[in-house]
């Protein structure tokens, strides 16, 4: 087993991400015995707090955000007892000496070998500086392992990402850097490669001979929420496409890896991005759509348009929706469009991948009474988790009527599925980088995104489409598929 005692140093220890996701995830792992039970956590933050006060923060976070009600008070108590707190100005080198003493003290007291997980749940602007301080103050040297976990966004274009990466790599080796893309922690995303490579059924027809197109949707009902400062600059392209959407493209399109080690998988994923056709200039207008929501009705409630949201400039050109037609120029995928879309304030929350297979020759069952559909394989990622296969079959009781039917597999219809963060945190503690993003993936994803961004910035308002809150997005996004004689498939 790879389980080992460790100290976790949690930057942003009382912040939003820590409270909502990380603390509940760590608790889940502790509760189910999936991590070594000898560990200590040092939470860091700007405010002054006593240890008991911080443990109270931890307790509340778990009570409020763990995926099921917590009934084991004693267990929660001993979990909370593993937490210490230290206030640290992350920009001030001197504080790191004190942090080092804290870490070493915990290690001595609890007899923990020098295994250290540094989790940076703080503003990405600080990633570089924090790594440098950790190294300069001797925290990254020790007899055990040291790992750095960082959240997105990793830079906001290729040059800034490269600069950040160079700075981090002065302190941590690539194999010690765990770049989070929380989509990779989702059960059904991890399942894509299993469905493909553990069955004979699909893989033989997983190519341009049999697949007509691929559709990837990640739609949300929430608006910009309280993240205007970040989001109005980032936009949906950087926020969702550069990472989550392209990760899904890679998993659907990659060749079978030679084995299941992270290096082999990264290698195949990276090849997909190398073959991904880059859009720039006028090709951006032809293949990419950007949209922004206007006011509308959602779940029976009136909601404001993006420009009316608090803090958003009234003339903001930021996109809250992106759709695109992508091509992967290799043997397997030549000519097969990958349609992608993602947006906020849409009609529903859903993440799914639809594989549309080519139609059969139309001389037998295509006639006016029939309503044949294409064969579809739908991989449902969120909120439903499962697979659905649409095939055509005879309508019972009729003589010649053929209709599409769906074979449905519901992976987990309850709420017991561990959250993405549980699985990712566990992997990081075990040293398994499979579901983290490699620098090369990040770099190539930016190289795809940057020229699109540039074209949009240059075209200013003219390339921005509008869609009503609560709708399925701008009609231009439907137009992309209509041009090719197809449409977005409405599943469920
Ligand atoms: C995050 C984005 O990475 O993913 C958010 O920054 C978005 O804007 C979120 O809401 C969506 O994640 P999920 O797991 O709810 O699909």
Image: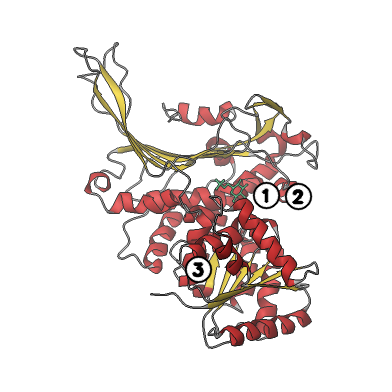
Nearer mark to the viewer, of 3 and 1 = 3
Please state which of residues 279 and 44 is positioned toward the viewer in this rendering.
44
Judge from the rendering whether residue 130 lies leftward or rightward of residue 260; answer left or right: right
Other residues around mark 2 within 10 Å, as few (<14) / some (14–19) / many (≥20)? few
Question: Mark 2 and mark 1: span between their CA atoms?
Answer: 9 Å
In the displayed structure image, the side of residue 329 where residue 324 appears, left or right: right
Q: Residues within 10 Å of mark 3 (few under 14, many from 20)?
A: many
Check if mark 2's residue and mark 1's residue have beta carbons within 8 Å.
no
Whether 412 is drawn above or below 477: the answer is below
Residue 278 visible in this rendered orientation of the protein: no
Percent x, y of residue 44: 71, 70
Mark 2 lies on residue: 229
Q: Quadrant of the N terminus?
A: bottom left
Q: Secondary structure at mark 3?
A: helix
Viewed as shown, does residue 221 lie left or right of 370? right
Q: Quadrant of the C terminus?
A: top left
Residue at the image position 79 percent from the left and 77 percent from the top:
92
| Spatial separation of the CA atoms under disc 2 and disc 3 | 30 Å
Q: Is residue 394 left or right of residue 163?
A: left
Name the residue beneath numbered marker 1.
234
Residue receiving disc 3: 428
Q: Is residue 256 above or below residue 372?
A: below
For the residue pair 89 and 75, the one nearer the viewer reads as 75
Query: In terms of image quadrants, where is residue 40?
Result: bottom right
- Whether label 1 lies within 8 Å of ligand 1 gets the answer yes
Residue 383's place in the image compared with 421, above or below, is above
């Amino acid at each position: 087993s790879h389980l080992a005692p460790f100290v976790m140093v949690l930057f942003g220890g009382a912040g939003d991400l820590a409270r909502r996701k990380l603390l509940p995830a760590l608790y889940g792992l502790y509760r189910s015995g999936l991590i070594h039970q000898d560990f200590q956590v040092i939470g860091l933050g700007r405010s002054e707090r006593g240890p008991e006060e911080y443990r109270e923060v931890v307790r509340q976070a778990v009570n409020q955000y763990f995926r099921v009600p917590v009934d084991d008070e004693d267990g929660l108590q001993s979990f909370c007892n593993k937490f210490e707190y230290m206030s640290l100005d992350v920009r001030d080198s001197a504080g790191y000496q004190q942090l080092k003493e804290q870490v070493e003290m915990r290690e001595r007291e609890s007899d923990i070998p020098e295994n250290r997980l540094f989790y940076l749940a703080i503003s990405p602007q600080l990633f570089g500086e924090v790594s440098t301080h950790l190294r300069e103050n001797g925290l990254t040297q020790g007899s055990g392992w040291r790992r750095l976990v960082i959240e997105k966004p990793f830079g906001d274009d290729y040059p800034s990402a490269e600069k950040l990466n160079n700075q981090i790599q002065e302190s941590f080796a690539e194999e010690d850097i765990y770049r989070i893309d929380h989509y990779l922690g989702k059960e059904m995303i991890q399942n894509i490669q299993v469905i493909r490579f553990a069955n004979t059924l699909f893989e033989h027809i997983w190519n341009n001979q049999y697949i007509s197109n691929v559709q990837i949707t990640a739609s949300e009902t929430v608006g910009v929420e309280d993240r205007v400062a970040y989001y109005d600059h980032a936009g949906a392209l950087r926020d969702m496409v550069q990472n989550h959407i392209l990760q899904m493209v890679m998993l659907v399109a990659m060749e079978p890896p030679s084995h299941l080690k992270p290096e082999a998988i990264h290698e195949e994923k990276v090849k997909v991005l190398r073959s991904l056709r880059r859009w720039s200039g006028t090709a951006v207008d032809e293949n990419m759509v950007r949209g922004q929501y206007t006011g509308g009705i959602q779940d029976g409630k009136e909601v404001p348009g993006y420009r009316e949201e608090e803090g958003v400039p009234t003339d903001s050109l930021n996109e809250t929706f992106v759709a695109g037609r992508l091509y992967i120029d290799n043997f397997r995928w030549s000519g097969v469009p990958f349609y992608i879309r993602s947006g906020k304030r849409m009609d529903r929350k859903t993440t799914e991948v639809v594989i549309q297979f080519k139609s059969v020759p139309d001389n037998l069952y295509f006639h006016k009474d029939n309503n044949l559909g294409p064969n579809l394989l739908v991989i449902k990622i969120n909120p439903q988790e499962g697979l659905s296969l649409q095939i055509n079959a005879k309508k019972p009781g009729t003589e010649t009527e053929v209709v599409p039917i769906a074979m449905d597999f519901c992976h987990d219809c309850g709420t017991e599925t561990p959250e993405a963060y549980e699985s990712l945190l566990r992997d990081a503690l075990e040293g398994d980088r499979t579901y983290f993003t490699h620098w090369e993936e990040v770099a190539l994803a930016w190289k795809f995104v940057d020229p699109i961004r540039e074209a949009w910035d240059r075209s200013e308002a003219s390339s921005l489409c509008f869609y009503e809150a609560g709708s399925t997005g701008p009609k231009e996004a439907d137009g992309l598929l209509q041009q090719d004689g197809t449409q977005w498939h409405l599943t469920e």
